[in-house]
Image (cartoon, helix red, strand yellow):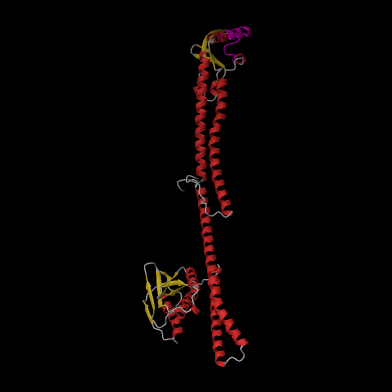
Amino acid sequence: MGKNGNLKVHAARTIALGGLFAVLVYVLITTTSSALIRRHYSEYGDAEAQKTEYATSLQEYVSENQILSRDRKALRAWTDEYKYLFISVYQGSLPISEEGFYYKETVNSRHINPVLKSQAPIAFSDGTYIVVFEDYRYIRYTQLWQLIAAVLAFWPLLTVALYWIRLLSKYISSLSLAARRINNGDLYSEVSVPPHASEEILSLAKSMDEMRTTFLDRLNEEKQRSHSNQELLTVMSHDIRTPLTTLIGYAEIMDKSPDLPEDERKQYSSIIYQRALRLKELTDEMFYYFLVYGSSDIQVDLAYYNAQVLIPQLINDRLSAFQDLDVEFQIQVIEYPFTVHTDISLLNRVFDNIFSNIRKYGDLTCPITIEMRRKEDNFIHIEIRNRIRDTNPDVESTHIGTKTCSKLMELLDGFFTFHSDEEFYTAEVLIPISYNRPADKL
């Protein structure tokens, strides 16, 4: 559990705090009101007259009805006229009868004292006894104020609870507003709540903000992809238009010149054939590019391979395409007993593209260097470097292949990087190493 606590902890704190305030209010009101009421009744001016009234009234009642000192029923009938009066009939130091307001059954009875207390001799039918009168009339107001205190004490508890509910509603409303903003396309406003909110609210806000940033990243990626595709289409339209225009031009010449010499006809046919091959190459590249970048369901068949067998095989398979050319390769493949986790079919596509570019754009009169090494980043690095020949406008690169290679290596949890200057082109393939895992294949 975090330092903020969850909703249950916040609710318990709220109830405890509200309960504490309620108890303090109740104790303060009851204590203060009881003291003020007792003080009022203790200081009222006719206290002595009241004491005399009690003694006179009881004596008259006893005399008229011939009441015995132990006749509690009769005494109770008299005390009923004085609701908050308690009397005790004493024989010596011992009470023989008690009747009236029984204060010991009331709330806080141990702390209740009579507001007036007096005694007088009363002549009963069976003798004269001392009667003690205890006046608790202030109790009626004390009980009323206890009820008022209970009602007033409820408000601090309710106030604290309502304040907590208001904060919770505020957080939820803030998250709801953030959700509406995201739904309306506003992905730049951060989703946040105060740091003292509960764990659930903070977690929800964090999840929503992560969702917002994920949507924003995807949107930016989509915009970048759209921009790249537009640039690609612009370049491709130019590259396709150039051989297509040439193809149409020579085809038109051949169509409108039936008497064209045979050697020129063969020359034009050869040019048309080369331009047609170029068009096919461009459309194939474009098709594969959009297949890779436009699909989220590319099947990746990962397996574990022995690197010192796989990588030389990948390189040697490509060198066979240069057997008809007088090309020098300088290969440095250091043997590493590592296992790599990759998809050999996608990896083949990457190497096919690299060596295809070398054949089309490289200066094959200069050596081509291939170096395999391992750095401290847990990748096997394969670097292929060749000299760039003078630019031929008919085979100008569209860079579709490099973008496709980058995407394919991303699917394989690796990397593809390249850089070029006016003289050399360097491509680097990074294949992740899997430690403590034997190869399944090769």
| Residue situated in front as seen by the camera: 31 or 56 | 31
| Secondary structure mostly seen in the magenta stretch | helix
Is 174 left, or right, of 377 in this rendering?
Answer: right
| Residue 45 image offset from top left, x and y in percent | 53, 10
| Residue 385 image offset from top left, x and y in percent | 40, 76
Against 179, residue 46 (above or below) is above
| Residue 79 image offset from top left, x and y in percent | 59, 15
Residue 32 visible (yes or no)? yes
Against 367, residue 380 (above or below) is above
| Residue situated in front as seen by the camera: 429 or 388 | 388
Count of labels shown? 0
| Residue situated in front as seen by the camera: 307 or 145 | 307
Q: Quarter of the image containing the C terminus?
A: bottom left
| Residue 71 image offset from top left, x and y in percent | 59, 14
Q: Quadrant of residue 367?
A: bottom left
Residue 115 visible (yes or no)? no
Q: Is residue 69 magenta?
A: yes
Against 336, residue 113 (above or below) is above
* The magenta segment: 55-75
| Residue situated in front as seen by the camera: 359 or 10 | 359
Is 59 left, or right, of 314 in this rendering?
Answer: right
Q: Is residue 72 magenta?
A: yes
Kindly identify the residue that appears in the image at 44 percent across and 74 percent down. Answer: 305
Q: Quadrant of residue 286?
A: bottom right
Kindly identify the residue that appears in the image at 56 percent across and 76 percent down. Answer: 241
